[in-house]
Amino acid sequence: MEYISKVTLDRPRTLAELTSMLIEKPESELIAGGTHIMSRPDYFPKSDFHSYISLDKVQELHRVSHTDKFLELGSMQTIQNLLNTASTTLSPDVYNAISRITSTPLKSKITIGGSLCLADSRTTLCSILAAVKAEADVRFITVKGDKKAKIHSRWMPVYKLYDSNGRYLYSDANTVLTRIRIPSAPNSTFIYDRVGSITNGSDHFVSVTIEFTLGQTSIITNPSFCLSFLKNGFYFVQGFDSFLSALKFPLESEDKKKIALFLSKHLPRECPAITPLQLERALRLTLNATEKVNRLIMDQ
Ligand SMILES: Cc1cc2nc3c(=O)[nH]c(=O)nc-3n(C[C@H](O)[C@H](O)[C@H](O)COP(=O)(O)OP(=O)(O)OC[C@H]3O[C@@H](n4cnc5c(N)ncnc54)[C@H](O)[C@@H]3O)c2cc1C
């Protein structure tokens, strides 16, 4: 393979060094845990691609800090590190859902940044972090013709990193996701369910993620609702959250019909690439999840 000798791999030690490298070589591809990059045929090294930058030594991307209100983690923290540091920030349900992501050796490799920045796969961690209202700090590096660069950073909700087809919005530009913030919500209620396999790249994968607080008066407060269709859709619509908050639990069959009607009308419009089977599965998973909420309310 003649092209392998042309590959360069840089390993900056600071965010400033990384930024300079991206200004110098804007066509570079970032490597975090490497689990996606290394497991794809013809992905590393690519025949038309020569410059990679590993993020593993960048100190700032490994930082962790806690406050009463949130946990902040550098994007190079792994899923396993997230579990090790977040047991008091996350509710037990969220913690368990993250624990169930793949095997422990892989959880120790997969980074938060690598999970959130996959160009075309909205995997478990994306849906969970979107539903728990996590925010991401994204650094944009715009290089002008004379190699002068404009750098700015912006915090944004995780769900805003994607379009409705599930594509990461910033994979073409020179952007680095530097850290995330997870609000502390140890008493929230959380439901995660899925059909289909992430590893088989199933066209029919669907997951549902719901987080909310159980109110005293049969309503749920502050809900967030996310449907992921892995490679062909990501549904996180604030309108549906308000719709859920307006319902009285436990839901009657009329309410469930309203939910099914709302989703059958909105989903094909919002996520036009999903298959009819995915739509059917999304309705089924959502109705199962509302059944779980019903049971929780009745057990209160
Ligand atoms: C067998 C297997 C099973 C898996 N099962 C699951 C599962 O059930 N649920 C789940 O959520 N995940 C699962 N994963 C992980 C998932 O498929 C990806 O492999 C993983 O999210 C990639 O993370 P990484 O840190 O290895 O990133 P890498 O492979 O290094 O990078 C992925 C992409 O993100 C970009 N990138 C990385 N970091 C940044 C950053 N800070 N800023 C900007 N761009 C960046 C890279 O340039 C690259 O394009 C599984 C993986 C494997 C191999």
Image (cartoon, helix red, strand yellow):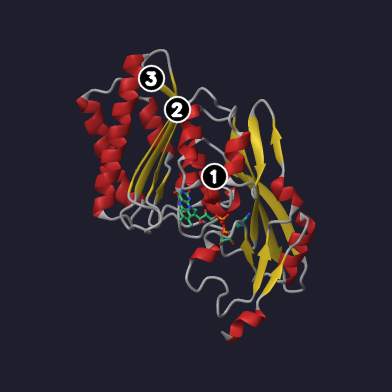
Q: Is residue 105 above or below residue 128?
A: below
Residue topped by disc 2: 212
**Badge 2 vs badge 1, beta-carbon distance below 8 Å:** no
Above-or-below relation of 168 to 244:
below
Asked if residue 248 can be seen in this view, the reply is: no
- Dot 2 alpha-carbon crowd within 10 angstroms: few under 14, some 14 to 19, many 20 or more: many
Closer to the N terminus: mark 1 or mark 3? Answer: 1
Q: Nearer the viewer, mark 3 or mark 2?
A: 2
From mark 2 to mark 1, how far is it between C-alphas? 17 Å
Label 2: state its secondary structure.
strand
Sequence-wise, the earlier of marks 2 and 1 is 1
Residue of label 3: 219
Residue located 66% across and 41% down the image: 73
Residue density around tag 3, few if under 14, some if 14–19, many if 20 or more, within 10 Å: some
Q: CA distance from mark 3 to mark 2?
A: 10 Å
Q: Which mark is residue 158?
A: 1
3D distance between C-alphas at marks 1 and 3: 26 Å
Task: Give SS at disc 1.
Answer: helix
- Which x, y percent locates residue 190? 44, 30
